[in-house]
Amino acid sequence: MAELRGYTQSKEDLQKRLARVEGQVRGLSRMIEEDRYCIEVITQISAARAALDKIALGLLDDHARTCLLGEGSGPSDPDAQADELMGAVGRMLR
Amino acid sequence: MAELRGYTQSKEDLQKRLARVEGQVRGLSRMIEEDRYCIEVITQISAARAALDKIALGLLDDHARTCLLGEGSGPSDPDAQADELMGAVGRMLR
Amino acid sequence: MAELRGYTQSKEDLQKRLARVEGQVRGLSRMIEEDRYCIEVITQISAARAALDKIALGLLDDHARTCLLGEGSGPSDPDAQADELMGAVGRMLR
Amino acid sequence: MAELRGYTQSKEDLQKRLARVEGQVRGLSRMIEEDRYCIEVITQISAARAALDKIALGLLDDHARTCLLGEGSGPSDPDAQADELMGAVGRMLR
């Protein structure tokens, strides 16, 4: 199935990492509930964001690799692949 | 209590926004479960990240405002305040 | 020569854009010389940085396209190509 | 004069750092001239960008410090100061 999705990391691993981010976001809500100091909250937001970035970079890595190997379920036209890939990079950079 | 925490947005508003991000992250896990195309997953990660950034910027705005008004429960020394504020900006920029 | 370098934009165009950034940076030095207000200086730095980002994204786009088309002078192994590409994306994201 | 501009670093130091970035950008143009491999060019762009970011963060640090100390030539109203400061942070984050 991996070659269809465009990523090869195991679902379980990805979902474990996402569950951790979900827990971080829930923790943020708790910090607000407890009136925690705002600089601490911002620091925790930066940590959750960094975890999301890392997951996205990993997915993009898998995707680029799959495309360059000529596999994957994405567009078969190299130009369309490049558009799609660079669109994702551009959104990540913003 | 707002002047103690360093932010003035209502808890309810912040928690509503965080709950939305939590839902986005849960949605990401579902996308993985359903073998959704990786570029779509990355796009959704970018959306969750942007939402977190906006929340952090809002908190930082409140915090800077509170400090500049000479209120808040943070350090009373302006230099320590600046260190703390710039530390948070630096972590957000990374 | 374009297929050797990995980018297809004309040299002249790229150099024109870089000359503009060079002018922006020289302008920054002049602003400091003239004791201009720091927020204005920071705004101009952000503009120069955005211009550099755009040039880098354009080069990366060309590069990814060239690789996906199986051209270019980069590594011929798709995995090495992906490593190189993602290394560049990672450095841009930092 | 420093308290008027909103930054306290010596002009000479700032201008030396900007001159270095200018040299980096000029070097980028030379790399294009010499048909250097695009991944190397992108790596050098990332280095120039990081140098600009560091200069901007240093200026912002000085500025925040000056404002929090109640000095500087910026707006005297704390809310206007916060708007200005957060505007600069927002532009840097983009």
Image (cartoon, coloured by chain):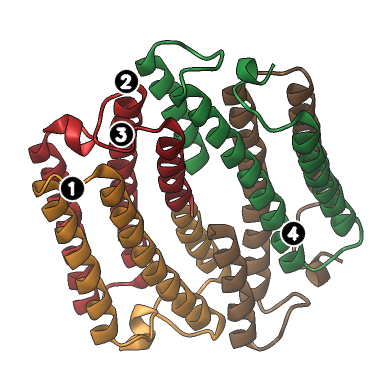
Chain colours: A red, B orange, C green, D brown
- Give the letter of the chain under mark 4: C
Q: What element carries label 1?
A: loop
Q: In this view, does C82 lie to the left or right of D91?
A: left
Question: CB atoms at circles 1 and 4 under 8 Å apart?
Answer: no
Q: In this view, does C28 lie to the left or right of B94?
A: right
> Mark on residue B36?
1
* Kind of residue indicated by mark 3: His
Q: Distance between the residues labelled 1 and 4?
A: 41 Å
Q: Distance between the residues labelled 2 and 1?
A: 20 Å
Q: Distance between the residues labelled 3 and 1?
A: 13 Å
Rendering coords of residue B90 (x, y %): 50, 54
- Give the letter of the chain under mark 2: A
Badge 4 and badge 2 in a common chain = no
Check the image and report above or below for A6 versus C5.
below
Question: CB atoms at circles 2 and 3 under 8 Å apart?
Answer: no
Residue at which label 2 appears? A69
Rendering coords of residue A56 (x, y %): 31, 44
Rendering coords of residue B71 (x, y %): 47, 85
Q: Which residue is drawn at 68% across and 70% down?
A: D66
Residue D92 showing in the rendered view: yes
Q: What element carries label 2?
A: loop
Q: Which of marks 3 and 4 is in front?
A: 3
> Mark on residue A63?
3
- Give the letter of the chain under mark 3: A
Return the disc, 2 or 3, that comes first in the chain's sequence: 3
Q: Is residue B38 left or right of residue D75?
A: left
